[in-house]
Image: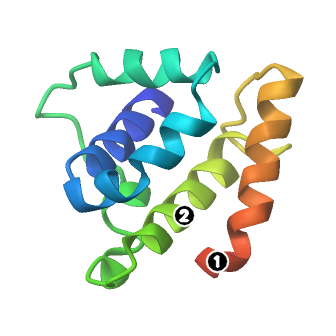
Amino acid sequence: RLLIEFKQFHDLMINDTGFIDDIKEIITAKFEDNINRVSAETLSNISLADVLPKSKIVYENHSDTVKDADRTNVYLKIAHDLHKKYVEGGSEFEVNLKHECRRNIVCFVQQHSDLSGAD
């Protein structure tokens, strides 16, 4: 499930060329020497079968806000929901992550939860 939802989220953002163009410089500067960049490139190389169900978190939960001019907020809401499902301590589908990786994700979600309107 985790890989499927994260890959679908990745593809949703990658296919939004306006969004990618807007954040390309930010991403390049932030992850210039970071190992997470390798992981993102690896995710780009994964193909999912078309018969797999679409993630409710990625494609449905915020479909009412998809038409927003600020697509970043939609993506932040999706990231927040994926965090709650897979990263948040005690979540049903919590994954085992290195402490530093978990800390970085939690900090990112906390910093951006005000922008996304997520609780």
Mark 2 residue type = Leu
- Which quarter of the figure has residue 3? top left
In the rendered view, tell whether residue 36 sits above or below residue 20. above
In the rendered view, tell whether residue 1 sits above or below residue 53. above
Q: Of 66 and 49, which appears nearest the observer?
A: 66
Horizontally, residue 91 falls left or right of residue 62, namely: right
Q: Earlier in the sequence, mark 1 or mark 2?
A: 2
The numbered dot on residue 115 is: 1
Q: Residue furthest left?
A: 50
- The quadrant of the rendering that contains the N terminus is top left
Which residue is located at x 59 percent, y 30 percent? Answer: 31
Callout 2: SS: helix
Which residue is located at x 79 percent, y 38 percent? Answer: 104
The image shows residue 108 at horizontal and vertical percentages of 73, 52
The numbered dot on residue 91 is: none
Horizontally, residue 96 falls left or right of residue 41, namely: right
The image shows residue 98 at horizontal and vertical percentages of 82, 19
- Crowd tier of the residue under label 1, counting other residues whose Cα lies within 10 Å: few below 14, some 14–19, many 20 or above: few
Give me the C-alpha separation between circle 1 and circle 2: 8 Å
Q: Of 15 and 56, which appears nearest the observer?
A: 15
Q: Of 40 and 22, which appears nearest the observer?
A: 22
Mark 1 residue type = Leu
- The quadrant of the rendering that contains the C terminus is bottom right
- Which quarter of the figure has residue 52? top left
The image shows residue 107 at horizontal and vertical percentages of 82, 50
- Crowd tier of the residue under label 2, counting other residues whose Cα lies within 10 Å: few below 14, some 14–19, many 20 or above: many
- Which quarter of the figure has residue 109? bottom right
Which residue is located at x 54 percent, y 67 percent? Answer: 77
Q: Pointer 2: what residue?
A: 76
Colour setup of the view: rainbow
Callout 1: SS: helix
**Mark 1 vs 2: CB contact within 8 A:** yes
